[in-house]
Structures are given as C-alpha cells and as structure tokens.
Image (tube, coloured by chain):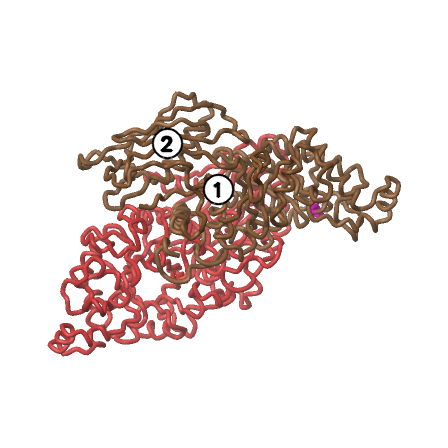
Chain colours: A red, B brown
Amino acid sequence: MMIKLWPMPKDVKFNSTSTTTLLVASHFHLITQYKDSSSILKDAFHNLINLINLPSSSLSTLNSQYYLLHGLNVVLSSTHDNLQYGVDESYNLSIPHPHSTSISNKPLYAYLKTFSQLCRFNYITKTVEVNRVPWTIIDEPRFSYRGLLIDTSRHYLPLPVIKSVIDSMAYAKLNVLHWHIVDTQSFPLEIPSYPKLWNGAYSNAERYSIADATQIVSYAQRQGIHVMAEIDVPGHAKSWGNGYPSLWPSKDCQEPLDVSNDFTFKLIDGILSDFKKVFKFKFVHLGGDEVNTSCWTTTPHIRKWLRRHGMNGYGAYQYFVLRAQSIALSHGYEIVNWEETFNNFGKKLSPKTVVHNWLGGGVAEKAVAAGLRCIVSNQDKWYLDHLDALWQDFYSNEPLANIRDPNQQKLVMGGEVCMWGEHIDASDIQQTIWPRAAAAAERLWTPYDKLAKDPREVTGRLAHFRCLLNERGIAAAPLAGPGRVAPEEPGSCYHQ
Amino acid sequence: MMIKLWPMPKDVKFNSTSTTTLLVASHFHLITQYKDSSSILKDAFHNLINLINLPSSSLSTLNSQYYLLHGLNVVLSSTHDNLQYGVDESYNLSIPHPHSTSISNKPLYAYLKTFSQLCRFNYITKTVEVNRVPWTIIDEPRFSYRGLLIDTSRHYLPLPVIKSVIDSMAYAKLNVLHWHIVDTQSFPLEIPSYPKLWNGAYSNAERYSIADATQIVSYAQRQGIHVMAEIDVPGHAKSWGNGYPSLWPSKDCQEPLDVSNDFTFKLIDGILSDFKKVFKFKFVHLGGDEVNTSCWTTTPHIRKWLRRHGMNGYGAYQYFVLRAQSIALSHGYEIVNWEETFNNFGKKLSPKTVVHNWLGGGVAEKAVAAGLRCIVSNQDKWYLDHLDALWQDFYSNEPLANIRDPNQQKLVMGGEVCMWGEHIDASDIQQTIWPRAAAAAERLWTPYDKLAKDPREVTGRLAHFRCLLNERGIAAAPLAGPGRVAPEEPGSCYHQ
C-alpha cells in the first residue's frame, strides 16, 4: 500500500494489513494543557477541521464495527506563541487503536498538516476516516529554511492571491515566503518614512499599505510561515526614483541607485526602520545581484565622487552592499544577499550574511567553505519561471551536493524555489508554482536516506498530493510535462 | 472619464465634473423593511462588505471635506426568498449627495454587485470611496438566461473550485451555472435511487455526494445563480454502464444507452426524481447531441427490437429523446436539449423544449421561427475551450442576429459560454473562463444600443474588470491574445 503523505515524514509506522478504521467524530476536538491566549492553537485546529471537510452531522447511528476518533490530545514541549526561525519543528503523531491520539511537539503546524493527510472522506459512509490504524509518525524537517519567492514588482499580486499561496505553502510544509517586494518595474509597498516611494507603483490600486503587509505577515504566521522581505539594492531599484528622482544617477541613466548620494542610504535606513515594525523575521534580504555600474562610471557627478574616493565601479558596488549591510545590522537584522556579492567580495561580507545562490550549482560549497551560511536556489533546477524545468528536476536538486563536512553541511540553511514574476500574475501563479514546488519541498523536508533516488518512484504519491491541492482549491497543474501544462486528455486527476 | 462598470448598466447618470467623494463609513449597514428570515439579505450584504474590503477602523478623524456613506437603504418591490427563473432583476441605484442611498429592486444581487464596482479603496486615505457622486443607475438585464457551462465528467472539479466559479459568475452578472455533470468519461454524482451509478466516477475521491450537490445549489442561490443540471442522453453516457452494464448495448459497443431496455428509462426516471429534490431550477438539460446509433443497429438484440418496432437508428434516436422528455415533464421540469434534436425532429419536440444551439450560427433563428425557445452557444464564438476564440469574438456574438420579429426575439432566452473539460481541470479553469466569459456577459446583460460596435472601444473597461476579478482572487487571464495566455511582459494589470 502506498503511504499517501507528502512530504514523506522521517519515520512512519502503520499496519498495512490493518482493517481498523477510525471515524473522525463530529465532536472532534483539540485537547491541550496549553493556555492558548492568542488562540493560535484554536485557529490552527479550526483550519484543520475545514481542511478535512468534517461533516457536521452526527455519527451516532453508525455500525459498531467502527471506532470514533474523538480528538487530538496535544502535549506541547514548548509554548512560544511567536514563530521563531530555527524553532524545533519536530513532532510525534500517534493514532492508537481505539480512539485517541497524543503527540508532543512545539509548533503545531506540521503536525496538523500531516494529520490532515491521513484523513479521507469516505463517500459511501459520508464520514472522515483514518484507515489502517495504528499510525505512529516521528517527524522533523531536514532543513530549517524551506522557501518560496514571490515577485510583486514585475506584476502586482492581490492580497487574496498571496494568502492562497501561503495556504498552499503550508500544505507542503514550506516555511519561508520570500517576498521580493520591489524591483526596477514597480514599488507597490507603502513606506511611511518615505511616503513618495510607492509613487513607483504601477497604479493607484496596485499597492500594499502597511496594514496589508502586516496582514500578510500575520496570516502567514498563523500557518507557521515566516515572511522575509527583500529590497534588491543597488541594481534592481529603478522604480524608487519615481518618488525620489535624486536616487537616480541621472534622468537618462536611472540604475543602480546613486552610490554617491547620502540620501540613498538615509532612505534605505528609513525603509529598514519601517520594515522592522512589520517584518519580524530574523533576516532581511538586501539583493545585490546583477549590478551594472556603467551609470556610475559615466555620470559626471558620480564619476567625480568615485575619483575622490579612489573607487572604480566594482569598488563602489562593494561599498554600497557593505554599507547597506551595516544599516540592516544596525536594525537588528541578519542579512541575505544574492550570490554575486559573495562571488565578488565574499571575504568582505558581514559574517551574518547568508549567501543566496541562484546562478547555478557549485556555489553553496564555496560559501560554506568560506564559513558563510547559504540558501540554495540554482536557477537551472529551482526557478519556477523556467517552465522547462520538470518536477523531476526540482525533486533531484540536492542542496548538500559535494558538501561532506558536517560542520559545513550545517551552514546550508536550506533552499528556496523562486517564482519570478515577469510572466506571472494572479492568473497563472498557482499552477506555475505547483506541483513543482512540492517536489522541492520534499527534498527540503525529508531525510536524505528516505528520498527517492529515482523521482519516478514518487510519481504516484506526488500526483496524490497534487490532487489534494486541487481539492483544497489550489490550482496545481498536472505532473505530466513541463510547468503549467494543461491536462492532455480527459481522465482522473491521479493519472495526469 | 471612463465609467468603470462591467457589464455596462442600462442607464448611468453621474457627474463627471463632480469632486464630491463619499467615504463608506465603518458602520456601513443595510436598511430594509423586509423581514429577512432566511438571512439572504444579510448574507448578500456581508458578501458586499468583504468585496469592498471595508477597513474596520473608524473614519471619525477625517477631514470635514468628506461625507460619509452610512448605509444602503433598500426598498424591495418583491420579497420572494426563492430565486426563480425569469424574476425581475431590475434595480435603481441612487447615491445622492450627501450621505445615503436608496433603491428599489427585487433580488438584491445585481444591485450589490454594481454598488461594489463603484467602490474604490483609496490607499492614501485608507478608506473605501465612491467618487463623483451623485450617481443614478437604472438597470436590468437584456436576457434572462446568462449561462456558463462547466463539465465535471472529463475532469472532476473539486467543490472549492466550483464555488469560486460561482463567485466569479456573480461578479459578471451571469445567472445560470449549467452543470454538465456526467458524460462518457465519468459519473461523479451520487444518485440515491441507483447507488451504483457513481461507480462510474474516476476514483473514490472524485465524487459529489447529494449533500455536495445541495451545497452547490444553495451556495449558487445565495449569489443569485441558478444551477441547471444535465444528463446527456443517449449519446454521452457510457460511464453509466460501469454500475449498470445492462445499459450498454453490449460489452463491446457501449454507447448510446440501450434504447431497447426499459431499465434505461426507469433509471432516467430515478435520476430525475432524485434531481428534483436538489435541482430546483425550472429546466433540466437532457443533452441529446452527437448520437451515433451504429451500436444500436449492429447489436443483435437491439436490431431485433428496432425491427419489431419498425424503427431505424434515426427513429430510435427520436424515440429515446422524446421518451426522456416526457419523463422530465412528468417530474415538472421544462427541458433543454442540444440542437441536434431540433435539427433532426424539431416538430416532434415538446413545446416546453428549449433548443440549445452549439454547432454554429443560424440555428436560433430557425428554432424561434418554429416557436421554440432557444439558448445560443455557437461554438465558434462562445466555446471557452476554443482557445483561439478571442474576447473580441465573445463580445461581438449577437444572440438575436437575423431575428427581427419581436415575438421571435422574446423566444431567445439568452446565451451561454461553455467551458468543456477535456483539457480543463482545477488548475486552469478560471483563467480559461475569464476574461472571455465577461465579454459575453456584457453582450447578454447590456442593452443592444449601449454595446460597443467595435470591441476595441471597451478594452480599457474590460481590462479594469479583469483586474477587479484578480483583486477578488479570481485567476482571470490577460486580455492580450487568445484564451489563457500568460502575461507577455512585466507591467500593470490594466495594460495586459
């Protein structure tokens, strides 16, 4: 029998010959000693009830051959309400015969998501069942950083779309939403300290107020997901100048941000000061990729400034990145930077830097050898906008490739799949993300030894997860073929 | 100034030079004399509040230059709780200066949807505004039947997906969900009278219980949408035989349903008897298209039966359709049949038949000339699965083409866009439907004289509606290009 769990837990014991089925009782409830003052557990449990589509009708008339599952008895070994990065995400889930379940864990999110996948609606008896009990699952993630990037600069993503992405991430046990908020094309976010910045929004409507951003962070937190905000400086920031044109080197040469202007850094300081009130995640992403310094070296006042400081374009790029880093550090953030910063001046970076790989393979091993932490997103395998990257490619991409020293392995925080927005908007984001992101999610969650060496072995189980996403209203695409492919012919979801 | 309403109401008066803006008050509420015992109005108003994203914070600190809109004062001229086909959908919406609005209408759905489109969130003041008051809108639909077909046989559509389609229909003022439930490929619906029928479902999970169907009907009704169920007999029904193989002419020749077997009609009677408890719409759709009778004329026992009754294949097709019609009539349904029934034996059809055009143009004029009612869905213009049909084609398709006699015009109930499911599932249905279905929705709602002769004139307004759909979490695709196209390049939603 196929275990229909995705991602596969660390250790699963069940009785494949068992014919014992538990029916989830209509009075199914959560039992915990924990004083749930911020109702985090209550909300999480309420989400579970919705997910498993528990019918409200009574089960009292059922045949006595069934046993009822009355509730989940949760013993919490830690009771922090605030979601912290690196928190112990492990849990033990035990569904013994006849009718109770008890566990021990810290954040409840992963546990409840696993439990929801054990539940099936039986259309004959009209009940929610857990089959083949007893189950004992011992689980914890392999990597603490399991990310997905969304890009709201190339196309604006409305709030309900972002919330739906967050829901879907939680189903796959991804835990970091990397919000690439602004870029060259648009600046949709309100920055109270510099209220003209979102003049760079595409329109009056394509914006996020601070209240919206706060809502996103809090919605994500209630699903066990961190939000990491990014400003990509100095290269991907042309839209900043719509509100503050002095950030541009000149009217005709508008990128990167003017390195010679103190206002540039004052403004970054203001942004991060505002960020700190909303984005409580340990890290802020400062970008730093694809910096072409020719506007600096050709614009007279900047050329003069460079000469005065004895810098060439390359040196000014380093100067900019390091100065932005120190601003972020002064606000209590640790930093993520795209890999070009490491490739160009890795030794100068703050030791609190996380190197975000994207250009290709082989970077993580260099970053961790240099003692820096790393997030893996090599574009050939983990860029979702590359429609020709198949789910099998996503599944097989190993973050620890060629890293054998256990201390260096620990520096790989995890990985992230990137949904860049050039050709993505509200109309096609979900089916471009899923099911391929799920393949990466298992790579990031499941112990290495339990991962399939040949992705074909997990096709059926991933198809099952894709159908589960569909059942939950997430527009995950068929597995067959490249990203975002339409079903080829009529047939069951499970065979597409 | 562009009026940003879709579909365009019958008559809109506003003051284009007005600078008066009303702010929707945080205590915004519905005033009505009507005793809302089934809380239909309360639900509808609650939906409105969600749609316009009314912030909960107080507006008391605002500058006195603004006026507050305290509520909607609704005078109902009819108070039927049950949604009936053909009900007067007209409304008058008046938003006078300074701060109240009063209307008169019957079902509130269209009125509230129009009002929601007058509201805009102002990101600077953080309030919901109605600009350029006063507004006076007098509105009613041109056609009473404004349909969308979904097909849950070729691919199963999970409940949240269907609900989301219903939501989106309401935004465009479409009012009939034509549910093509079963077909050759699968039979997902529970039929209590014949409980083996859904053995023809693709899998144990890809099913709708009677409770699910009831939920869909009631969810739709709360949005002002009727659900018309279809069984497509005798041609598109192979999946029925999975549970009851005697419905097949033979094991090797499984379609159409065995015309010689009384059980076939007994079963149709059972289905319609069960339907009647769930699908309260005036019409049931009995299909009748694409019937190839060669299984009948080649299978010995049916050949014998045909000979005994002096029928050829053609005659048996007519016999089947008419017998199915009389069963439906006996259950109190009026009937919709695909156009082949009319094309082949139109004079024999019950006068309670509605001819559902699909093969091409020119059919409606023949059907109404014969005194029958008609629904227009010519596939070259209104089949959403034809990805090469552009929104401009959908917009320009005129149901009354070549029908000049007012009495014949009245027989055209309206039209329907069809989202056939061969290459459509939960992953791509919304962006294949929208925005093209919206173009048809305006054709079906707006008075002929107010429709654009050249669709290009409405591009900006339709783009605006598409972005509104996105804001509401509906994955409507860009306008540029054929169906379900991805955005070509970064940019504002309003220019894609």
Is residue A414 shown in magenta? no
| Residue closest to the eye, B461 or B202 | B461
In this view of the protein, can residue B439 be seen by the observer? yes
Task: Estimate the spatial distance between the alpha carbons at disc 2 and disc 1, rounded to whole Å.
Answer: 21 Å
Quarter of the image for residue B310 reads top right
Residue type, label 1 = Met
In this view of the protein, can residue A163 be seen by the observer? no
Q: From the top left corner, tell me how far across and down residue A252 is, in percent.
A: 22, 69
Whether label 2 touches label 1, CB < 8 Å: no
Question: With respect to residue A215, does B413 lie above or below?
Answer: above
Question: With respect to residue A300, does B297 lie above or below?
Answer: above
Q: From the top left corner, tell me how far across and down residue A166 is, in percent.
A: 40, 51
Q: Which range is magenta?
A: B236-240
Q: Which chain is mark 1 on?
A: B
Give left or right: position of A457 versus B96. Answer: right
Query: Could you tell me which quadrant the N terminus of chain A lies in?
Result: bottom right
Is residue B238 shown in magenta? yes
SS at mark 1? Answer: helix
Residue located at (71% from left, 39% from top): B346
| Residue closest to the eye, A300 or A16 | A300
Residue B169, label in figure: 1
Q: Which chain is mark 2 on?
A: B
Q: Mark 2 or mark 1, which has the lower sequence index?
A: 2
Query: Could you tell me which quadrant the C terminus of chain A lies in?
Result: bottom right
Residue with the mark numbered 2: B93
| Residue closest to the eye, B391 or A123 | B391
Give left or right: position of A386 versus A34. Answer: right
